[in-house]
Image (spheres, grey):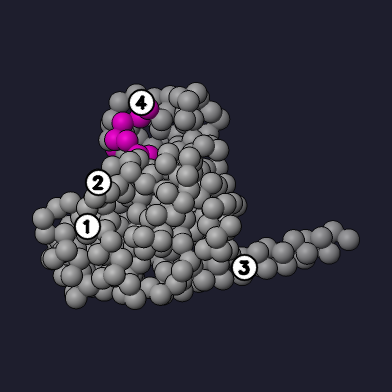
Amino acid sequence: MKKTIITGFFLLSIISFAFSQSRVDTLLEKLHNPGSNYVFVTAHRGDWRYAPENSLPAIENAIRMGVDIVELDVQRTKDGQFILMHDATLDRTTTGTGDIADWTLDSIQTLRLKNGCAIKTKEKVPTLEEALLLIKGRILVNLDKADRYFDEVYALLEKTGTTKQVIMKGGQSVEEVKKQFDKYLNKVIYMPIVNLDQENAEKQIQSFLKELKPVAFELLFVNDNHPLPKQMKTQLTGKSLIWYNTLWDTMAGGHDDDMSLENPDAGYGYLIDTLGARMIQTDRPAYLLEYLKKRGLHN
């Protein structure tokens, strides 16, 4: 009887792993299809309304609800270990104080994370390696702030077998990206960030299309009367996907999460229908998923 139970457990594990692997492959296929109507949902710092930001439970809940990409922040400790944390200091999100660079990993792991109300929880600060093992084969991940030490980070990606799941982004020029990431551009996904309010924005986009043919661009603009966002929908159709952030109003002309809570068609819908967004980073992943599923834009 015991042998049967163990065999069944391993069989279920194999089936579960195979399913999760196929989900990542499906997401990658959609990511490389610029003509798709599918809209990717990115959870900013995980589902931080459920658990502390950049925590393992916040990542796990994002995966469970069907999020496609989880955005995580990387910092390095005094002894050269990588952890998940947005700030360079411990004060806001943990029970500790001071610069992360002045703390060793073993000391940081004695701390507890705070939730969105600044209340101490039972959760510890996760290492990047722990997070990568959790997401392996299950979801794509955007590693923010990891470009500062990407050689070391990439070694962790190889160790954990997660290289194909990682999205890197940055606001550098084509020349700077090629210089810094050249040996990685065929191994991880790189998306340029372009501020459409900058004078050379259109030229920068055309340079990336010619030199690197990125699968997507993250675009930023402050005011809704800017003509370039609508032009980008036409210029990038069939070439690259468009990523917008709805975290706060100055990132996408006011069409943010707050507007979407009052009128999702005016918020998310405008970005999708008028500006051609196919990737949205949000602090309201459950709400965005519900909206997209009702419209048949996510499954």
| Residue that mark 3 sits on | 19
Q: Depth-wise, is mark 1 or mark 4 nearer the camera?
A: 1
- Decide whether residue 91 is among the magenta residues: yes
The answer to which of marks 4 and 2 sits earlier in the sequence is 4
Q: Which mark is residue 91?
A: 4
Residue 216 or residue 21, whichever sits in front: 216
Separation (CA) of disc 1 from disc 4: 41 Å
Q: Which tag is nearer the camera, tag 3 or tag 1? A: 1
Q: Name the residue tied to disc 1.
A: 227
SS for dot 4: loop
From what the image shows, is residue 180 above or below residue 149? below
> Residue 77, how many percent across, how many down?
32, 39
Q: Earlier in the sequence, mark 3 or mark 4?
A: 3
How far is the residue under mark 1 from the one under mark 2? Answer: 10 Å
Instruction: Look at the numbered disc 3 and give the secondary structure of its residue.
Output: helix
Counting residues from the N terminus, which is met first, the one under dot 1 or under dot 4? 4
Residue type at tag 4: Asp
Q: Main secondary structure of the magenta part?
A: loop
Amino acid identity at mark 2: Asn
What residue is disc 2 on?
223
Q: Is residue 140 visible?
A: no
User: Can residue 276 be seen in this snapshot?
Assistant: yes
Q: Which mark is residue 266?
A: none
